[in-house]
Image (spheres, helix red, strand yellow):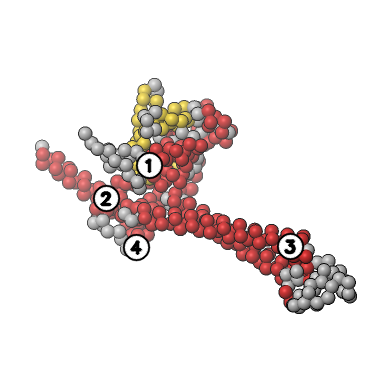
Amino acid sequence: MAFSKTIPNIGELDLKIRFEYYGKERCSAISIEFMQLSVGGYQGLEDVIRQIKYINRMPVIRVEYKDDEGDFVDLTPNNFTRFLRVVRALPVLSDFPVVNIRVSEGSSPFLQKQLSSDETKRYPTKSSRKELSFEKEDSETAVETTIDLFEYKSPIEYSLETLKEEMIEIETQVESAGEHLEHLNNKYANRNLNKGRGKQCSNCHLRLDHNMRNCTIDKCLTSEQCGDPSKHPDERSLMDSATEDLKRLEKELRNKTNEYDTRLKGLNSARSSFAQKIRGALINSKKDKYLVKTGSGMFVPKSGLVNQDIAKLEKHFHGKVPDNVSEMSKTFQSIIQNFDKKNFLYWRFFYQKSR
């Protein structure tokens, strides 16, 4: 009997997807990286499941996963985090953890409420597919054009790009908020207007060592005259509000920066293997071979095929990553073709010899 174990840092896992096909139960397996699963969320998982052509014909699907007690539980955006926890704790009896998923036509009560007309348009019904069949040739041409412009990046790389854009935007807001606060300080808290060390007058608010009774200066109506916003609540409130805005934005920027650094460390850690270091370059070397367009318009990698070709490249390069991966990726397909050709000739020779 094999002993099971749990893996704290999951790389790749297998989705074992069960569904009914003309009354008979079928099962398909799809490989996916755990990082892609966690970053993509529920919608990302559904897009991957819809790589199975028969399931993609269903206008609405109900997704269930097998939990640690052996029960199939409805999977929704609300409990997706719990699903990830179950995946992390899966027992591993082979090379990769196996996630059991059951798909049927229809949806859970939760998703029925979320379903909109846009979803129906994304996954047309049988009758609407017949009506749109004449558009197939044009749509295929559009896909080819789109995929040429598409550059594959892993989900975590996309999340890092998004975080970086958010950080740049917040940095701009921080700079703007700082300039605004500086403007208010110069306007309402100009200490050059009130340099005196004497007693402050409650009429003119200046420190000229006199009081309201013998003050010969007009009553101070704004801190622009006295440089002391504490005597003018409305102007003090403006400055306090600007200070709070700046602190809030600076805190938000720190949080985003910390999140970015954490994800970047995770990406660098995941890229420690040969496979992860060349995966993106391999996919982009022949996108029409390795990518498939899902019902939602996303391009996702065919993980099984990608992994097969990575193994061939790793054998060719003896496990050592080339110095210039982006430049060397131009030769990846010819290397793979030569590998397949040699393998074919070897097995043909072996077969003929065995006869």
State which mark lies toward you, 1 or 4.
Answer: 1
Q: Are marks 3 and 1 in contact (CB under 8 Å)?
A: no
Q: CA distance from mark 4 to mark 2?
A: 18 Å
Q: Secondary structure at mark 4?
A: loop
Q: Earlier in the sequence, mark 3 or mark 4?
A: 3
**Residue 354: percent from the left, percent from the top?**
10, 39
Q: CA distance from mark 3 to mark 4?
A: 59 Å
Q: CA distance from mark 2 to mark 3?
A: 69 Å
Q: Nearer the viewer, residue 186 or 306?
A: 186
Which residue carries the number 4 mark? Answer: 324
**Residue 164: percent from the left, percent from the top?**
51, 57
Q: Earlier in the sequence, mark 2 or mark 3?
A: 3
Disc 2 marks a residue whose amino acid type is: Lys
Q: Earlier in the sequence, mark 3 or mark 1?
A: 1
Q: Residues within 10 Å of mark 1 (few under 14, many from 20)?
A: some
Which residue carries the number 1 mark? Answer: 88
Q: CA distance from mark 3 to mark 1?
A: 53 Å
Which residue carries the number 3 mark? Answer: 236
State which mark lies toward you, 3 or 4.
Answer: 3
Which residue is found at the position 44% from the left and 44% from the top? 38
Which residue carries the number 2 mark? Answer: 312
Q: Earlier in the sequence, mark 2 or mark 1?
A: 1
State which mark lies toward you, 3 or 1.
Answer: 3
Q: CA distance from mark 1 to mark 4?
A: 34 Å
**Residue 340: percent from the left, percent from the top?**
25, 47
Q: Residues within 10 Å of mark 4 (few under 14, many from 20)?
A: few
